[in-house]
Amino acid sequence: MTVSYTLEVANARFGGFSRLLFRWRGSIYRLLYKEFLVFCGVYLFFSLIYRFTLTPNQQDLFERVALYCDRFTNTNFIPVLFVLGFYVTLAFNRWWGQYTSFPLPDDLMMVVSGNVHGGDERGRLLRRTLMRYANLSSVLILRSISTRVRKRFPTLEHIVEAGFMTTQELNKFESLHSDFNKYWMPLTWFTNLASRAREEGRVRDDIALRLLMDELNKYRAKCSLLFHYDWISIPLVYTQVVTIAVYSFFAFCVIGRQFLNPAKGYSDHKIDMYVPVFTLMQFFFYTGWLKVGELIINPFGEDDDDFETNQLIDRNIQVSMLAVDDMYQNLAPIVKDKYWKQRHFSVPYTVSTAAETLRPAFQGSTFDMRVSTEDLEIHQQTDAPKQYLRQGCHTGSLPCLLDESTFLNREDEVHEANGTNRKSQDKAVFKVSVEHH
């Protein structure tokens, strides 16, 4: 069952996350303790062999091997951080994509309830059968990818016994031979039954039928996407590279992180201890990171944090049948709301939340900004002539400034010249037309 701790971290407080460290179910301790004990046992075995069993010559050889291994574990010879970080990011994106691709019938059941009409037994039968076909398709696809659902419905007869399929539908399902997964077959029944409902007038127009088909295609696309997530995994070579990198790194640490005899003066071996604290912490972090990737790479198993597919199936069939059957045209009387006669009203608070009413509403980040007296003064324009930027007032190409009066006089001169030219042109045209006549 999925471990949820959302309520416990709703408010940030002292020790909030620390309390989560003592949980066992769904924790990293439960996921990692076996590997951790194996690593501690192997490290202790070599430590005891080195200290109490080997001869002085053999100890010298072991120490040279340990220094050689330690040189590679303390450098970037094995890029554990890089390969682990990229792998876990890729696995998390895949995990979230599978979650968002889970086929939920909510949108489809709303469209069926609002567009397949009829309060009689025939209308009720059509709506319930349409939603049963949709849920049957999701059960078939989840049965193909989830171990929990497969254990719940090991054969198609168990699906018939659960009420998702009738015996006649099972015979039709098995009579169609195909080498591929036939989860799409109930959705085809859905489309045919919706077309029949349109012919009977239960679906009143083609727009409503098109809306049904659009929502069904979205539902089918999610079922198909889940199937392809199960079919196409993260490339095996990358998973092998990450696993080999982590385990080979700590295989070298078993020898290279041994505490050598301080009397021999080896560099960085001034203290003799039996428990490698920081090496154990490094093992916990790196191997725990790898375990996170293993946990979320396929969330349709039976781990603590895997998806609750069986409960989702129960929820989907119950909610969809309630929406298209009990809730069909089941409306409360339409009455005036409580604040019908009030233009301005406020919704009441409880005693524990009444203090929130004293907080001012957000008006914008600059609403309470302090301004100086200069910002409040209004600037009045003087009667000095304005200057305009004019091009070509001199022989050069640089622009020059002209006063407003000069600019207006020149504009008037241009208008008068244009008017004189237009009058002379009109007289010439009139003279030519008179001579012509």
Image (cartoon, rainbow, N blue to C red):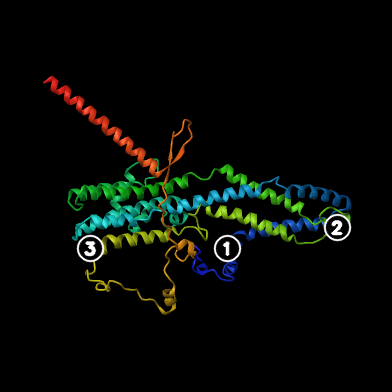
Label 3 to label 2, Cα distance in Å?
A: 85 Å
Q: Answer whether labels 2 and 1 touch (C-beta < 8 Å).
A: no
Mark 2 packing: few (<14 Cα in 10 Å), some, or many (20+)? few
Image height of 169 relative to 374, above or below: above
Disc 3 marks a residue whose amino acid type is Gln
Residue linked to disc 3: 329
Is tag 3's residue or tag 1's residue first in the polypeptide sequence? Answer: 1
Mark 3 packing: few (<14 Cα in 10 Å), some, or many (20+)? some
Tag in front: 2 or 1: 2
Is tag 2's residue or tag 1's residue first in the polypeptide sequence? Answer: 1
Disc 2 marks a residue whose amino acid type is Pro
* Residue 262 position within the rendered picture, expressed as x and y whole percent measured from the top left: 86, 57
In the rendered image, the residue lying farthest to the top is 436
Q: Quadrant of residue 364?
A: bottom left
Residue toward you, 186 or 152: 186
| Residue 96 as seen in the image, left or right of residue 254 | left
Disc 1 marks a residue whose amino acid type is Ser
Label 3 to label 1, Cα distance in Å?
A: 47 Å
| Residue 271 as seen in the image, left or right of residue 138 | right
The residue under the point 76% across, 50% down is 70
Residue linked to disc 1: 27
* Residue 287 position within the rendered picture, expressed as x and y whole percent measured from the top left: 63, 55
Image height of 32 relative to 345, above or below: above
The residue under the point 23% across, 31% down is 423
Residue linked to disc 2: 262
